[in-house]
Image (cartoon, rainbow, N blue to C red):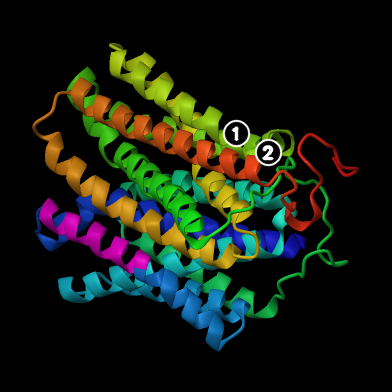
Amino acid sequence: MLTFAWATSGLYLLDGAVAVLLGAVMPEWLRHYHASYALGGRLVLVQAVGFVAGVPAGAYAVRAVRTELALSGAALLVGMAEGVLCLLPPQALALGMVALNGVGSGAVESLVAGVVLQRFPRRRALDMSRLEVSFGLGALGLPAVASACIALGHWRLVFLAVALFGAVLALWWPTLKIPQPDSAEAPVGPQDAPLAAPALAGRAAKRGVLALFLLMTVIYVGLEVNINSFMPALFLRGWRVPPALADFSTTCFWIGMVLGRLAMRWVARVVRYDYYLAVSLGACLAFLLGLTATTGAVRGLAMMWGLGWAMSAIYSLVMVYAAHTFPDEGHRVARLVTAMAGVGGTVFPLAYGALLAHLSRVTAVALLALMALALVGDWVLLWVTLRCHHRRAPTAPHLSGLPPEGRSTASQ
């Protein structure tokens, strides 16, 4: 089980690095190709489209080969694409490699999440928190590696570093075997805080609840990508700080993210999914409202750290809570949530980026707060809907033998 944990964490670390790689080397990339930021926008869009396409591609792969080989193939696809990009090929080929990079990344994320949600239902939040910490470390550490490569005058070596890491994972995964739940190789250990699964009667009710989870995913990922992509520009415009300090705003955000995801591993043992998600969404809205009213750059950076902490658990909790609500559909939930994450990470940044040139700093941050308010509204509607189903079915079955709400277990 420990080897499996390290292997899955490695895949999420790879995904986190891939997610921020283009942005980290974008100025050098555009300078090499003598291109404007229009090419940069196409690169981001192509990778996002590839990510969405990678979700069904991963599902198709596991029908043809075992999951371990499918994950190996996805990591190999990322490694091959990054290796070709290191050679700085012609633009058309580079765009194709960026798309393949996105396909491999989307397949990795959906397949790993599906395995965790489906096979280890008693500790979904704990395992997803570990994976999200790995993703955050990749997103936090890759820019530092890129900066070092740029300083040495060999910026394209960052592609080679990611390619080699992907190749190592591709060679490792065929030697592994995913442990079965409740077996000697997969002891239960610490568990998530117990929560009764709702009994959703009828196809319309199930579709409505699932739609609310997916809408929350789209809005959340759009908000997160907007913050990562545009907050440095807002710091430059609103607080007139040096570029290095403006870039540090996203570093503060990701430090808060990583620390919050580390804390999630303990919080999820005692706080139910629904309560944890409600507090996280409320804190996210509060920090964005505070950032709107903040006039000093230092206070703004502190708000960014707090915002990262507040948002750290939201994506994992949405995926875990959706899987909890639809028992025995972990793989399907993972695919849908991951695909909607790709949609949100594409549509909202395109719209927000188009508006940004015409907005003041306060108005631009207020729009982000409005997205957070939409998340809170979605959650309220979801909570009311699920509470109604709980009242209609007081003897609803508990997921995987979990005890009723409020009752402790021996392992806790």
Q: Look at the image and tell me whether residue 137 can be seen.
A: no
Ranked by sequence position, the earlier of labels 1 and 2 is 2
Check disc 2 and report its element: helix, strand or loop: helix
Secondary structure under badge 1?
A: helix
Which amino acid, by three-letter code, is at mark 1?
Tyr
How packed mark 2 is, by other alpha carbons closer than 10 Å (few <14, some 14-19, many 20 or more), is: many
The reply to whether the magenta stretch includes residue 126 is no
Does 164 sit left or right of 259 as displayed? left
What residue does disc 2 label? 268
Name which quarter of the figure residue 266 lies in. top right
What x and y, as percent, mark residue 214?
42, 52
389 to the left or right of 346:
right
State the predominant SS element of the stretch in magenta. helix
Circle 1 is placed at which residue position?
276
Asked if labels 2 and 1 touch by Cβ distance under 8 angstroms, the answer is yes
Please tell me the numbered disc located at residue 38: none
Q: Residue at point 55% right, 80% down?
A: 62
Question: What amino acid type should be assigned to the residue bearing mark 2?
Answer: Ala
Please state the horizontal and vertical placement of residue 246, each as a whole percent of the image: 29, 29
Separation (CA) of disc 1 from disc 2: 8 Å
Q: Which residue is at 49% across, 72% downward?
A: 75
Q: Which quadrant is the C terminus positioned in?
A: top right
Q: Magenta part of the protein: which range? A: 37-52
**Residue 392 or 112: which is nearer the viewer?**
392
Q: Nearer the viewer, residue 348 or 87?
A: 348
Q: Is residue 47 magenta?
A: yes
Viewer-proximal residue, 305 or 148?
A: 305
